[in-house]
Image: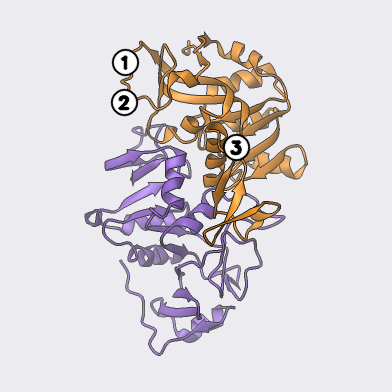
Chain colours: A orange, B purple
Amino acid sequence: MKGALTPAAAAEMIPDGASLMIGGFMAVGTPERMIDALVARGARGLTVIGNDTAMPGKGIGKLITAGAVARVITSHIGLNPETQAKMIAGEIEVELVPQGTLVERIRAGGMGLGGVLTPTGLATEVEDGKQIVEVDGNRFLLEKPLKADFSLLAAWQADYVGNLCYLLTAHNFNPVMALAGRTVIAEPESIVPVGVIAPDVVKTPGVLVDHLLIRAS
Amino acid sequence: MDAKTLIARRVAQEIKPGMLVNLGIGLPSLVASFVPASLGVFFQAENGVIGLGARPPEGMEDPHLTDAGGSFVSAVPGAASIDSAMSFGLIRGGHLDMTVLGGLQVDEAGHLANWKVPGKMVPGMGGAMDLVTGAARVVVAMQHAAKGASKIVPRCTLPLTALRRVNLIVTDLAVIEPTGAGLILRERAPGVSVDDILAATEAALVIPDDVPEMTLS
């Protein structure tokens, strides 16, 4: 862990055109202050990998509204009419991926695997253009790993070495994305001394985390 | 009784003691209120909780605890919070006993289409493809017809959700079991005749000698 940053300083590290994994499920467990700082910086041309695009005014929805996003890899855009409108207008490219496949592609990217074999998507539109692999008589789709320039995570607590823990349904994609971004920035709700988060409670070891966002003022 | 309540009450009878069940958003989510707590059933929300409970009292909501539709929920005693990889491991890996999903069309092969209307509605498949592929039992809960058109059709014209044959269809008119020998009419809704069902169904149905009336939870 390299230290704590202001949201604005973190947003300056992220160049236009970067690929970002952003944790959250309908904006629960999403790093909102990080997103606000990217909007304030006027970021453009981002590729966003996340479960969904939330809704206007929340989480990833704020990046969509601000025109910061060129491409989305996601499982669901149904509750954000702006994503759908921009997709139809050709302003945003959307790749729709089944949710379980999306998390496994991210896991494969972060854990050094060459891909995932899944039955999900066989004989549907998801199969188009993909390799089918037969294992012991069962057919699977080969789904390729995903990595990104940055992973932007939300956590409940972080300690001074970057260990993270999460609450309830705010885990979602965060622990998996922690391995798949070249630079990992976590936005905790509080930062506590080393030892406060017991080793058995740590879900993301601090060795994966490059930066924390400083506490909200 | 309105159509949705009827469907939910009939689907509730499919849920057996000790099951792990995933209810889709919308109509399927109504099923939970007709399942007695004494059954010891755990409901999964794929965003990250096993042991979904009722919405908390006004002002008592926890922003870290929502269902897959983003609504505030609680967790029952014995609940577990999980990340998205575990959540979809449960679903895809055959550990989920039952899923209840809405449908746009089901056809004579028992194939479900429920995620896309090309050119009109492209919300993304979310977790639907994984749920239909991986759950031990798939129950489709839907109105028999939409705008006068049968949703039970000879062959789906909308994009399929999965290759898998669903296990049961529960509508406001009938309970239908897809099998290798076609769609078998198992039950009639209260006050509905076999002829009423045949007239409202575009797909061919197999009619057993005895088609009893539904009993409801």
- Quarter of the picture containing the N terminus of chain B is bottom left
Secondary structure type for disc 3: loop
Q: Residue furthest right?
A: A90
Amino acid marked by disc 1:
Val
Tell me the residue at 41%/79% (across/down).
B186
Amino acid marked by disc 2:
Asp
Q: Is residue B118 above or below residue A212?
A: below
**Disc 1 target residue:** A196
Decide: few, some or many residues near mark 2? Use Cα within 10 Å; few <14, some 14-19, many ≥20.
few
Percent coordinates x, y for residue A144 in the rendering? 62, 42
**Residue A190, quarter of the rendered image:** top left
Percent coordinates x, y for residue A128 in the rendering? 69, 54
The total of numbered circles placed on residues is 3
Q: Residue furthest bottom?
A: B209
Question: Depth-wise, is mark 2 or mark 3 nearer the camera?
Answer: 2
**Disc 3 target residue:** A53
Secondary structure type for disc 2: loop
